[in-house]
């Protein structure tokens, strides 16, 4: 079995990511769930420590998680609220037409380092969905890497420990390398691949998924040259039954994101 890439970092992860605005993903996911007839089954792929799932289950959702890292799932389960999750790879999901709604967020798609792996993951996500099922995922753009990571090094103080970040980006290969060091320990190295919007759309088409919307993640409007994160909402099959309700939902999200 492949070594757990987050084994050394999992117990620090939620503290390191405390600044991340998970609320936007939670609100968008909750709104999108409103498109589906109840009850429905939801799976969060690359669920990490279960931040999204635990909130949704408090709302009464039938949510389960899948993540490649046993350590991340184990760390998330140390909290008081239990939540169901299994260890699995998004390129080979243990699901087959059993899910009505799938999410895969926080640029998890970018951790797939080749276009073929990204295609396989999106195909697997499609296979997991029932006909008419909805997929919501996001990916970061090259603009995100160039603005916030490429060629930068910094140190963050996280209460009882500190993290040092050292980031590089190769525009020829579209690969970003981030080294995260806890205190004076060994560096934990993570790579992400910048997948082009065209490649993402081709993968959706190949997997039998029809885009309901492809939007700037910060505005839920049309992506622009300076867009740093893209949200994709797609349907397995015909998206037409969702379009009217989705337009109203999109307006609500645009209003919320302006605040």
Image: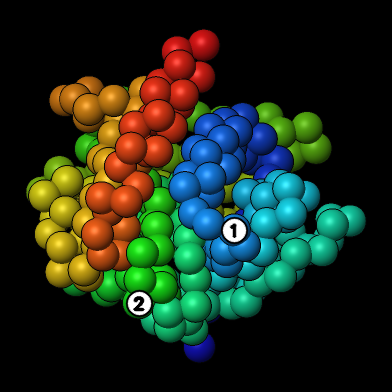
Closer to the eye: label 2 or 1: 1
Residue 250: image quadrant is: top left
Q: Callout 1 environment at 10 Å: few (<14), some (14 to 19), or many (20+)?
A: few
Residue reaching furthest to the right: 80
In depth, the one of 75 and 213 nearer the eye is 213
Residue 127 placed where, x, y %? 35, 77
Q: Which residue is mark 1?
A: 38
Q: Nearer the viewer, residue 197 or 41?
A: 41
Observer-nearest residue: 203 or 101? Answer: 101
State whether residue 110 is above or below residue 132. above
Task: Give the side of residue 7 with respect to residue 166, left or right.
Answer: right
Q: Residue at x 11, y 49 (%)?
A: 198
* Residue at the spot 53% in from the left edge and 45% down from the top edge: 34
As helix, strand or loop, the secondary structure at mark 2 comes to: helix
The residue shown at (35%, 47%) is 242
Alpha-carbon neighbours of circle 2 within 10 Å: few (<14), some, or many (≥20)?
A: many
In the rendered image, the vertical position of residue 114 relative to residue 243, given as above or below: below
Q: Which mark is residue 215?
A: none
- Residue furthest bottom in the image: 1
Give x and y (percent) for residue 129.
41, 71
Q: Is residue 108 visible?
A: no
Residue 246 coordinates in the image, percent (x, y): 37, 38
Measured along the vertical axis of the image, is residue 96 above or below residue 188? below
Nearer to me, 103 or 105: 103
- List the residue tagged with mark 2: 127
Rounded to the nearest angstrom, the CA distance separating label 2 from label 1 is: 21 Å
2 or 1: tag closer to the N-terminus: 1
Q: Which structural element holds mark 1?
A: loop
């Amino acid at each position: 079995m492949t070594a757990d890439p987050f084994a050394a970092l999992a117990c620090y992860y939620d503290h390191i990511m405390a600044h991340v605005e998970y609320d936007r993903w939670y609100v968008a996911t909750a709104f999108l769930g409103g498109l589906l007839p109840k009850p429905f089954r939801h799976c969060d792929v690359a669920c990490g420590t279960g931040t999204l799932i635990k909130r949704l289950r408090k709302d009464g959702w039938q949510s389960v998680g899948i993540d490649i890292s046993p350590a991340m799932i184990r760390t998330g389960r140390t909290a008081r609220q239990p939540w169901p999750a299994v260890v699995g790879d998004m390129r080979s999901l243990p699901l087959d037409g059993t899910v009505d709604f799938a999410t895969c967020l926080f640029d998890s798609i970018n951790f797939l380092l080749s276009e073929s792996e990204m295609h396989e993951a999106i195909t697997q996500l499609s296979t997991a969905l029932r006909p008419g099922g909805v997929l919501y995922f996001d990916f970061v753009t090259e603009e995100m890497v160039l603005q916030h990571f490429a060629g930068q090094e910094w140190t963050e103080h996280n209460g009882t420990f500190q993290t040092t970040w050292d980031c590089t980006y190769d525009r020829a290969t579209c690969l970003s390398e981030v080294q995260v060091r806890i205190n004076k320990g060994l560096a934990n190295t993570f790579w992400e691949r910048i997948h082009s919007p065209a490649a993402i759309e081709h993968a959706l088409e190949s997997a039998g998924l029809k885009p309901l919307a492809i939007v700037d993640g910060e505005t839920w409007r049309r992506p622009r040259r300076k867009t740093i994160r893209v949200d994709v909402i797609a349907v397995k099959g015909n998206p037409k039954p969702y379009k009217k309700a989705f337009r109203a939902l999109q307006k609500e999200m645009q209003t919320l994101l302006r605040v």
